[in-house]
Image: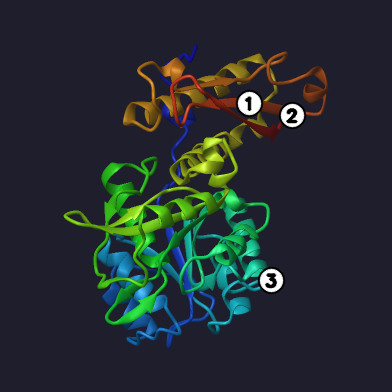
Amino acid sequence: MPYVEEIPAARSIRPLPASVTGFVGACDAGPVDTPVVVTSDGEYHAIFGPTLDPGRPLGHAVDLFFVNGGTRLTVVRAASPAPDHLVPGAGGGVHALADSGITVLAVPGLTADHHLQVSTALALCASWRAVLVLDLPPGPFNDGAGAAARQTGPHRERAAVYHPWLVTGGVAVPPSGVVAGVIARTDAERGFWKAPAGVSLHGLDGFTEALDDVANEALVQAGVNAMREFPGRGRLVWGARTLAGADSAEPARRYLPMRRLTDHVLGSLAAGLEFVVFEPNEAPLWLLVKQLVESFLNELWRAGAFPGDRPQDAYGARCGLGETMTHADLQDGRLVVEIYLATMRPAEFDVHRLTFQTQG
């Protein structure tokens, strides 16, 4: 049963920023391969140029991000719209965001059929504990588009794909920018653990394709999220699955908000427990680690991040010899903590492990 007691402020675990959005794309002006923070579309255009070019969709994506509720954005200008400049093998492009604390990434102009670049971007997202809002190629959805989306490498649970493309100002643009704005709005209004689905879209003239229930089901089977228009309700984001959602039962792999919540917890705990590397790997430290983890998780539970009316149905932690560590672990200086998270239903836990190298 989770046990929570007051922890001195010096030893509390502080949550990392959970809603930090980064865009990478080609534009007319501004520094290349350099992260720049902007807080409005006007500030973006003053730095990166006023042109709204369909062949370089970054400008439209930024506009739609702010129109749909985004308030702060880190932008990297790529050297060109070529996929290998947006996501090069090393250095520049997406790599320039490595130290920006990004949790949500969009690369307008990169589509799911650019398999090598998408795989590289997702590997970076895995190392950052971030997610990628990914676009399909333009045109109607078909089996080929679905197959292309699934060929994205081993980190598909970090990709959220949306369809169809949007029409704004008479121009067809990819949806990643507007979705990133909706995610930012949902984070601010309801919490980053809430699904950015059933949420209205702003700044659009329409979609390039109208989806009915049959088309929507085809997207669901491919792990792709629909964007739809309903009479009396307007244009909505209609899903929050990851690309792994069609073939995984694990919530953190299947659903975007569960992926982000899990990342936030593990990232915050990994950073907040770094002090253990300088401490003796003994029972007092194990108890402190358990208390720190449960205190941190209790704050999230009280905010509504986990289901359940009781803490023990929402989260838990273990750390100790015979529980998470063996004598061999202690001899090698390893401290292992297990974290139990009920992200979907009370008392249905996903188990995660964090390992630290201590002084022994």
Between 246 and 184, the one nearer to me in the picture: 246
Return the x and y of residue 255 as percentages of the image width and height.
Answer: 48, 43
One can see residue 188 in this view: yes
Q: Up-down: is 307 above or below 55?
A: above
Circles 2 and 1: CB distance less than 8 Å? no
* Spatial separation of the CA atoms under disc 1 and disc 3: 34 Å
**Which residue occupies 50% across, 67% down?**
136
Q: Up-down: is 31 above or below 359?
A: below
Q: Which residue is mark 3?
A: 89
**Which residue occupies 65% across, 14% down?**
283
Where is residue 56, by image quadrant? bottom left
Return the x and y of residue 25 as percentages of the image width and height.
Answer: 48, 76
Q: Up-down: is 200 above or below 9?
A: below
Q: Amino acid at mark 3?
A: Gly
**Which residue occupies 69% across, 18% down?**
282
Badge 1: residue crowd in 10 Å (few <14, some 14–19, many ≥20):
many
Q: Secondary structure at mark 2?
A: strand
One can see residue 103 in this view: no
Q: Is residue 300 left or right of residue 198?
A: right
Q: Amino acid at mark 1?
A: Val
Q: Which mark is residue 143?
A: none
Q: Which residue is mark 1?
A: 337
Between 314 and 248, the one nearer to me in the picture: 248
Q: Secondary structure at mark 3?
A: loop
Q: Amino acid at mark 2?
A: Arg
Circles 1 and 3: CB distance less than 8 Å? no
**Which residue occupies 51% across, 23% down?**
348
Q: Which residue is mark 2?
A: 334
Q: Is residue 269 left or right of residue 313?
A: right
Between 353 and 166, the one nearer to me in the picture: 166
